[in-house]
Image: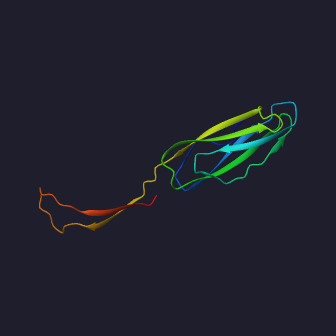
């Protein structure tokens, strides 16, 4: 198993839907039924449903996986793992991981609340702001 036409390292921002492709191969000489499982970072939402599927000997198939990266996801590197197990013999299994880099959402908005109209150089003064992260 491996990435189909997918990159092994994906980049995104929070609040985005990502789709990647996994290529699954049955290298045996028997028809097999596989049960897929997608492991995502905590809080991420799997959009595509995964269902058991069959592959003939040496047959290859591509599986799409779409998921939502929530707005609350912190910037960093996360792992997504696609696992398949043989339905009859679960010990026959394979997995492949891709990494998703969530970029920082730098969309800060600053609003001045209060500040002295005039200041004298060298003297201290205070101003108040509201900073909102619109990312």
Q: Position of residue 121 (x, y in %)?
A: 12, 58
The foreground one among 4 and 132 is 132
The structure residue drawn at horizontal position 29% and vertical position 66%, both measured from the top left corner, is 112
From the viewer's perspective, is residue 105 above or below residue 118? above
Image-quadrant location for residue 16: bottom right
* 60 displayed left or right of 18: right
* 107 displayed left or right of 7: left
The structure residue drawn at horizontal position 87% and vertical position 30%, both measured from the top left corner, is 29
The foreground one among 68 and 87 is 87
* 94 displayed left or right of 76: right
* 54 displayed left or right of 45: right
Quadrant holding the N terminus: top right
From the viewer's perspective, is residue 42 above or below residue 59? below
- Count all numbered tags in the image, as a single digit: 0
Image-quadrant location for residue 15: bottom right
Q: Position of residue 130 (x, y in %)?
A: 34, 63
The structure residue drawn at horizontal position 15% and vertical position 67%, both measured from the top left corner, is 118
Q: Residue furthest right?
A: 30
The structure residue drawn at horizontal position 81% and vertical position 34%, both measured from the top left corner, is 89
User: Colour mode?
Assistant: rainbow
Q: Position of residue 44 (x, y in %)?
A: 59, 51
Q: Position of residue 66 (x, y in %)?
A: 66, 51
């Amino acid at each position: 198993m491996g990435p189909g036409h997918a990159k092994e390292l994906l980049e995104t921002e929070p609040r985005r839907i990502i789709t990647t492709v996994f290529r699954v191969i049955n290298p045996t000489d028997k028809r097999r039924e596989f049960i897929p499982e997608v492991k995502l970072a905590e809080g991420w939402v799997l959009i595509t449903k995964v269902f058991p599927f069959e592959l003939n000997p040496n047959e290859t198939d591509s599986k799409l996986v779409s998921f939502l990266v929530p707005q609350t996801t912190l910037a960093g590197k996360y792992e997504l793992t696609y696992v398949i197990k043989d339905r009859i013999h679960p010990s026959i299994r394979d997995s492949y991981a891709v990494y998703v880099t969530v970029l920082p959402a730098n969309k800060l908005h600053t609003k001045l609340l209060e500040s002295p109209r005039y200041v004298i150089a060298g003297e201290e003064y205070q101003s108040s702001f509201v900073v909102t992260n619109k990312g």
